[in-house]
Structures are given as C-alpha cells and as structure tokens.
Image (tube, rainbow, N blue to C red):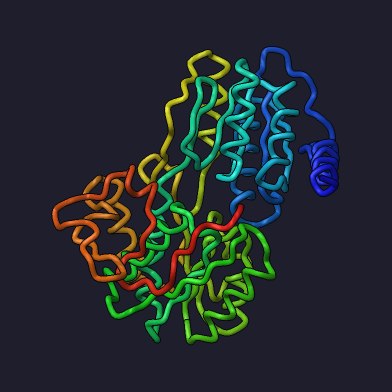
Amino acid sequence: MKKGIFGLLAVLALLALSCSNKAPAPEQPGKPRVAFVYIGPPGDGGYTYQHDQGRKYMEAQLGIKADVVQSVPEGADAEHVIADLAQNHDIVFTTSFGYMDSTLAVAKRYPKVIFMHCSGYKTAPNMGTYFGKNYQGSYLAGIVAGKMTKKNIIGYVGAFPIPEVIYNINAYALGVQTVNPKAKIYVVWTNTWFDPSTERQAAESLLDKGADVLQAYQDSPATLQAAAERGAYAGGNDSDMSRYAPKNYLTNPVWNWGPYYTKVVEAVENKTWTNTPYEGSLADGTVTIAPLGSDVPASVKALVEAAKAKIIAGQLHVFAGPIMDASGKVAVPAGENLPLADILKMNWFVKGVVGTIPAPAAQ
C-alpha cells in the first residue's frame, strides 16, 4: 500500500514539474488544449525524442503550445497522470503501448476529451489509436546488415517480447535473408524500453558471441555505443542515431510524427475527428529510415532504394510468402501476404532468428 501511495505522489510531482514549459501552457482562445504523455525523457535520443519532435512540428504549424509529462511509468500510475490531464485538455496523446488500458479507463470517464493512444488496439468513441508499419524500415535496415556482416552473426537487442518488437525482428531478418541467407540473427531481451545500462549489457553479450553487426529495438543509443567501442557496426531505433557513433552506424527505422499530430489536432478543432485506427507507412512518410552510414557502399544503398521504391509502390510486401518459421514450418504460404491483423499479433520467429519468445514481462 505504501509503495502505491509513494508512487502516486511521485507521479503527481512529476506532473507538476515536467510540463514542457515547467508550467501548464497558457490559454489559447479558439485552439484545442493539447497534452502528451511520454514513457521516457525527450533526450533519450530515440522513441520519445521523435514523439517530441513531432509535437514541436505540430506546435509550429498550428501556433499552439502543448503540455508534456515525461518519464511516466506504464501501469496504474499512468492512469492518474492521464486523468489529471483530462481535466483541463481537449486532446491527450498517450505515446506508449503500456498506456493502453489506462487511457481507455480515463476515456470512459471523460467522454468529451479526445484520447489518442500510440501502438495499441483498443478504442472508444472518444479514443483512437495510431502507429505505423515501422517493420518496413526494419526490412530495409536488414538489407544493410546482411551486406555489412562478415561473420554472418548479427545480434538484436529487443525490449519486450510483444508483437511490435517481434514483427520488427522478423522483418529485419527477412531483409537480411534477401541478400545473405547464411546470416543468423541472435536475440536478447532486456524487458525494458529505456535502461541504457541493461541495453549495453545485452549488446555486450551479443558481441561476446561474435556478432559484428547489432540492431536494437530500444529507446536509447546504448547498443550502438557498445558496438562502436568493440569495432562492430550497429543500427539504433526510432530516430537517426548516427551522431552517437558516426563511424559504426548503419541505419534504422525512423518515425516522423509531426504531420500526423498536426492532422489530428486540426481534425479535433474542425470537428472532423474520428476514432478510425491509423497505420502510417513508408508511402505516407510516417515511417522512413535514417541516412545510411558512411561505410555503407553505394551498391548497398542502391539495393535499399530499390526495395524502398517497391514497398511504396505496393510491389513488395515484407511478409510475403513463402516464409518459414524458426522450427521450419510454413508460416506464410507462397503467393500469400500475411494480413496486417496477423502481423500485429505475431508471436513467432522466422527461420534464421535464434532465440526464445517468453511470456512478456510487465511493462
């Protein structure tokens, strides 16, 4: 009981101190009042950083100032933060999967407030969801990795064993296999989105196995930094992380949330908002990849650009059969494309991925 009370007090204190201007945004007559809830700090260099860049873009486009609460733990405490924001905002963006149930609970209590939840699947009349096909970017990053490995040992640092991370690992592996079917992708789980120390330990364990290329589905650049210290190549996640290790960087998927956030706020303002789930892609620019690293040859860049163009044109589907799972069974038959609904609940590895998928730890 005490732990819960102190956790609540900590979150309420965070709410008071963590807004974008250290105080609630001033009233802006005629403009929607907007708030964001972040899982990490905007300075994480990855996931939260990109959401924050999207917020800033939206603010500049619409001439408004949003409130921000950062580093809010997923779970019960998040519900208190979201509910507090709902009392004096028109739109609340909750930007992490683990906020889903908390967002839904608050949405039911505040039917006049619009809630937008990132990466989830539950909706309500006043609650929508949004995410994107970042696995398209992971596939392209895999092409680069497959060409850059010399040992055919690639390491992948994954956050949680949930579908979002699993389908990105698989897409990456499929990209690798298009250019290097001999390569193996070894997965280590951290059970955290943002813990640079834990992420580094996972990366180092993969380097100890002989990996000469690493990829991470994490919020910090720790994997990239660990790889650079050992002379290996690596890609990060969510944001262009080349600045953390420019000589060792390859590429990774990048989010571009600004135009979408602008569109949502405008729709609420114009009373045209709906709760239709949004799934961005390479085609609409919500998903892209960072510029390829300086060591990546022009021939590899050409392969990536060709694959990217085919994905955008609808001529290449990342999860097009035939695809074998890690046990050697047919997971996607030849001539079929795995439906998006099945991608979003993926709980199996493709052939060539080495690792286990345990039950997800609490997020």
Considering only vertical position in the picture, is 76 above or below 148? above
Considering only vertical position in the picture, is 142 above or below 137? below
Q: Is residue 76 visible?
A: yes
User: Would you say 21 lies left or right of 155 here?
Assistant: right
The quadrant where residue 265 appears: top right
The quadrant where residue 103 appears: top right
Q: Position of residue 93 (x, y in %)?
A: 61, 33
Question: Observer-nearest residue: 81 or 313?
Answer: 81
Question: Observer-nearest residue: 14 or 298?
Answer: 14
Name the image quarter holding the N terminus. top right
Q: Position of residue 157 (x, y in %)?
A: 53, 68
Total of numbered circles in the picture? 0
Q: Farthest residue to the left: give it.
A: 335
User: Would you say 363 lies left or right of 135 here?
Assistant: right
Which residue does the image show at 58% across and 84% down from the upper left? 230
Q: Position of residue 176 (x, y in %)?
A: 34, 70
Considering only vertical position in the picture, is 66 above or below 320? above
The quadrant where residue 143 appears: bottom left
Q: Position of residue 142 (x, y in %)?
A: 38, 66
Which residue does the image show at 56% across and 38% down from the upper left? 100
Q: Is residue 294 visible?
A: no
Which residue does the image show at 70% across and 24% down from the upper left? 86
Question: Observer-nearest residue: 244 or 34?
Answer: 34
Q: Farthest residue to the front: give it.
A: 1
User: Would you say 265 lies left or right of 345 here?
Assistant: right
